[in-house]
Amino acid sequence: MVPRYSRPEMVAIWSARSKFRIWFEIEAHACDAMAKLGVIPVENAKAVWKARDVEFDIDRIDEIEAVTKHDVIAFLTHLSEIIGQDEARFVHQGMTSSDVLDTTFNVQLVRACDILLADMDRLLAALKRRALEHKMTVCIGRSHGIHAEPVTMGLKFARFYAEMDRNKRRLITAREEIATGAISGAVGTFANIDPSVEAHVCAKLGLEPEPISTQVIPRDRHAAFFATLGVVAASIENIATEFRHLQRTEVLEAEEYFAPGQKGSSAMPHKRNPVLTENLTGLSRLVRMTVVPALENVPLWHERDISHSSVERNIGPDATITLDFALARLTSVVDKLLIYPDNMMKNLDKFHGLVHSQRVLLALTQAGVSREDAYRLVQRSAMKVWEQGADFMTELLVDDEVTAALGTDEIKARFDLDYHTKHVDTIFARVFGS
């Protein structure tokens, strides 16, 4: 992945050093289990652990692979060079390459998911804090990008919190589903290796044995995992898009933090652009593009083929590294987002009370006017606001048909902003609990 959009902890999971360390642990734990069964000598199993603190020579492994054209064999050859050929005689006994590769891939995905879950906790904390801070900060709600009725900025943050909280639960489920390992040998029948070896290795690595693995772990698990990452990415873009709209010059109800010395444009010194949320929109697309290849990896030929392998070598690191970076960046954006309540009120009043049209409509129907007639009466005044810049309340007060049904005080009472926030506490209790 591009270093610009990477964070060290997640990158380390996908390093060659980390991969070979997991390969070694799988082989060593398998030898321990086989020694306990009496399949291999205890001395040979113990000898494998001589490589416990050794830094594997990645260049040497690559050199061997250039000849063998097989990455696992290259590693095993290098391991035998470290611990001795005779001592390594029983390493990989009854196993196949996929036992090592698939189990390792799932270990990496589990570890990556743990980082993503920690990222999610930090984002949720930021969203909750901003939601409570702006619980009653009134702003205009929009549908189709057009003024609708008042909401609060706190409700926006609460909505995003609820969405990301669902995503956290999805990630937990995805982690559980991907946390399986397979040490079942060629075509997955355990013909040359005892199932207890698999159980031992999985327990040591924090995995559950795959119930039936053929020669590979079923790829529907991985498809579900990457689909979950795709949903999280879509939610990131959902939040980023809202902030981008709110920062438009004509709106300017919220704005990304603009640091001292920061420059917005190489040409125009006045610019303050939503570059972080635009970046998040792009990064979200990168994560989502891994979903379809993961789905296409599900159908493999018979007990195995390797059409999935090249895909996963790319999408495993790319999706998790990118999503980790994106979650961290979004958390920073939320933490530092500038909120402009005065601009919110200016925008809300831009059309001179028009946002209260539904309240007047409902009052008319309560007063005995048919819904069709009530809609016609309210829209008649509303269009004058749209087209002529008139004041909505004033137009209603001089409309004889409206005032015949509603008195002056009743009309004016329908322009109370507090009416729209009376259930905010109820919504917050649903989202955050009491």
Image: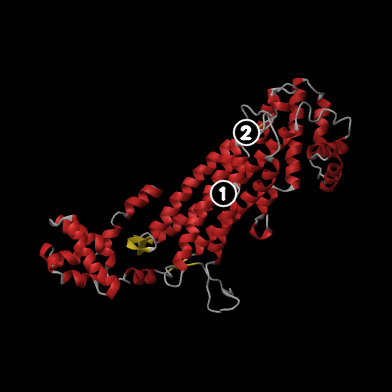
* Nearer-the-camera pick, 318 or 398: 398
Q: How many neighbours does mark 1 have within 10 angstroms: few (below 14), some (14-19), or many (20 or more)?
A: some
Image position of 264 (left or right of 339): right
Residue in view at x 83 percent, y 38 percent: 79
What residue is pinned by disc 2?
218
Give the side of residue 227 with respect to residue 203, left or right.
Answer: left
Indicate which disc residue 118 carries.
1
Left or right: where 233 falls relative to 107: left
Against 425, is 376 above or below?
below
Q: Quadrant of the N terminus?
A: bottom right
**Colour setup of the view:** secondary structure
Circle nearer the N terminus (2, 1): 1
- The image quadrant of residue 8 is bottom right
Q: Residue visible at 62% across and 33% down?
A: 218
Visible in this render: residue 19? yes
Q: Position of residue 296 (x, y in %)?
A: 61, 41
Q: How many marks?
A: 2
What's the distance in space between the residues labelled 2 and 1, CA to CA?
27 Å
Q: Position of residue 380 (x, y in %)?
A: 22, 67
Viewer can see residue 117? no
Helix, strand or loop for disc 1: helix
* Quarter of image, res 410: bottom left
Spot the residue most to the left.
Answer: 404
Amino acid type shown at disc 2: Pro
